[in-house]
Amino acid sequence: MPYDVFALAAAACWAFGSLLSVEASRHLGAFSYTRWRMLLVAAMLWATTLVLNGVQTPSFAHFGTMALSGLIGIFIGDTALFSAMNRLGPRRAGILFATHAIFSALLGFAVFGERMSAQPLAGAALTISGVMIAILFGQRKTDNHAWETNQGHPGIGIVLGLVAALGQALGTLVAKPAMADGMDPVEASAIRVSVACAAHFCLLWFGVKVAQPVRRPTLPVLIQTGLSGLVSVALGMTLLLLALKRGDVGMVAILSSVTPILLLPLLWLRLRRVPAKGAWCGAAITVIGTALILSR
């Protein structure tokens, strides 16, 4: 089904984008990084909407819904995710964020009555298990790269990772009715990002301490931030919204949760280190689970 492909493509975008984001996020700080990224992505998305739809008044029939989705999923969820990555590194933050698939499946069942037959349910269980195994057992004892070090108390990082997962699940849940009603996904992404960006600037305007940048942005950092936003948010989030047009919230979330698996070869290329056996085992289980879902 097309929405399966869109969900998996979104996961691939997030994997590539997360690799681009690590250094820029630590340079600017989570809040400042997210603010710059949202500002750049909002400009990209509204420009794309202008090109695709011409000069016309945007449809605000679902503005409130998408604004709420942006506040929960991006303003809270993304900021918490990058805060967790800054404290725990991308691997450990990834396993916490992967729980958004479980939250989404439970919320989809509770709110929309979404159910899975035996084969997709088995595939979902294998996919989530494989992702967890790959991250939990994907590090070698000799790995001591700077990205794997704790920055601050790890307990705070764990809480932030779970908040990010819940924010992603709730943001997706809120967006589902609007997307099912036929809302343009690029315009929907533009509204979500713009509202989240405005919320970030409000924090900066009111002088909230955590919203202040850790360091001043440099041109290379801004370029890296823009590229990460283009891949992860402008493209990845739009693909996720496309998947929600016809796909169930839980199933879309499960398929898009394979980001850590897709991140393995990228980290291998970036860090020049072969993933541990646990990572390969988890990846194999995830592939089997995804195959069961796609062949239903």
Image (tube, grey):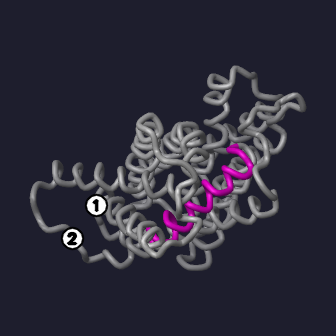
The residue lying at 47 percent from left, 39 percent from top is: 221
Q: Are marks 1 and 2 in contact (CB under 8 Å)?
A: yes
Answer whether residue 70 is magenta in the image.
Answer: yes
Question: To which residue does mark 1 refer?
Answer: 187
Mark 2 is on which residue type? Ser
Q: Residue 208: tell me if it is visible.
A: yes
From the viewer's perspective, tell me whether residue 97 is left or right of residue 227.
right
Q: Is residue 251 above or below residue 275?
A: below
| 132 with respect to 120 (left or right) | right
Q: Earlier in the sequence, mark 1 or mark 2?
A: 2
Helix, strand or loop at disc 1? Answer: helix
Examine the rendering and report whether any part of residue 128 can be seen.
no
Closer to us: 280 or 4: 280
Q: Which residue is mark 2?
A: 59
Q: x, y percentage for residue 208?
A: 54, 72
From which residue to which does the magenta span run? 69-90
Specify the quadrant of the image occupied by residue 280.
Answer: top right
State which quadrant residue 183 falls in: bottom left
- Image quarter for residue 189? bottom left
Q: Which mark is residue 41?
A: none
Q: Residue at x 36, y 55 (%)?
A: 39
Q: Residues within 10 Å of mark 2 (few under 14, many from 20)?
A: few
Which residue is most to the left? 55
Q: Describe the element under mark 2 as helix, strand or loop.
A: loop
Q: Residue 146 placed where, x, y %?
A: 74, 36
Q: In the rendered structure, which amino acid carries the disc numbered 1?
A: Glu
Q: Is residue 296 magenta?
A: no
The residue closer to the viewer here, 234 or 127, is 234
